[in-house]
Amino acid sequence: MATKKIAVFPGSFDPITLGHVDIIKRALPLFDEIIVAIGTNASKKSMWTLEERKEKLSKAFSDQAKVSVADYSGLTANFCKKSKAQYILRGLRNTTDFAYEQTIAQANEKVNGVDSVFLICSPEFSHISSSIVRDIARHDGDYSSLTP
Ligand code: ADP
């Protein structure tokens, strides 16, 4: 039997946006399993709690048998090993995302043998980020068109 292709889609997901949903849906034909993994970091304060973020993610993908939701602390590459995932999935919006991702992806491949797969975001979602949603939420704005 061929080895299952498993990808981890790591992020803060504070909160999940339509941009994240777009990347995951488009990656479904590429993998047998996608683990959406919330990276937790004691020094990074989130607006939504881990439980809230997990619940939003689970709801968004409740109809996708290939997608599961998890959380982890520490190195993404270590979580991939533990989960038997050979790939890290990431979305790219612009050259700033690319510059940030490049060295991390190169290090993950060289040091841990985990390869990264990037999808360029769909143009209608390139303006969406979790930080924009948090800004709007902080000022009691309506962010419903940016999140699932
Ligand atoms: P991080 O804190 O690791 O950047 P995020 O939750 O912000 O976590 O993002 C997780 C992944 O989703 C990253 O690869 C990011 O580039 C991607 N992403 C975020 N917003 C969008 C978007 N609008 N379109 C496509 N990809 C996106």
Image (tube, rainbow, N blue to C red):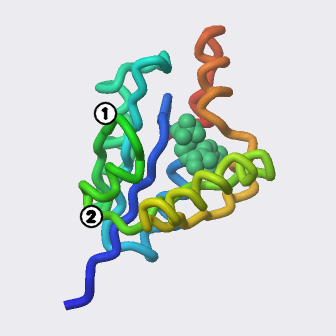
> Can the viewer see residue 18?
no
Q: Is residue 57 above or below residue 92?
A: above
Q: Is residue 80 above or below residue 18?
A: below
Q: Nearer the viewer, residue 115 or 145?
A: 115
10 Å crowding of disc 1: few (<14), some (14-19), many (20+) = few
Residue at x 41%, y 47% (from the top left corner)? 76
**Residue furthest toward the bottom?**
1
Counting residues from the start of the chain, the first of labels 1 and 2 encountered is: 1
Q: Position of residue 20 (x, y in %)?
A: 53, 48
Secondary structure beneath label 2 = loop
Ligand 1 near label 2 (Cβ, under 8 Å)? no
Q: Nearer the viewer, residue 76 or 52?
A: 76
64 displayed left or right of 121: left
Quadrant in which ligand 1 is drawn: top right
Q: Position of residue 70 (x, y in %)?
A: 29, 43
Q: Position of residue 82 (x, y in %)?
A: 24, 55
Camera-side mark, 1 or 2: 2
User: What residue is pinned by disc 2?
Assistant: 84
Residue at x 78%, y 51% (from the top left corner)? 94
103 displayed left or right of 51: right
User: What residue is pinned by disc 1?
Assistant: 55
Q: Could you tell me the amino acid type at mark 2?
A: Lys
Residue at x 34%, y 56% (from the top left corner)? 80
**Residue furthest toward the left?**
1
56 displayed left or right of 103: left
Q: Could you tell me the amino acid type at mark 1?
A: Glu
> Can the viewer see residue 4?
yes
**Residue furthest toward the front?**
111
Residue 146, picture quadrant:
top right
Q: Is residue 37 above or below residue 25?
A: above
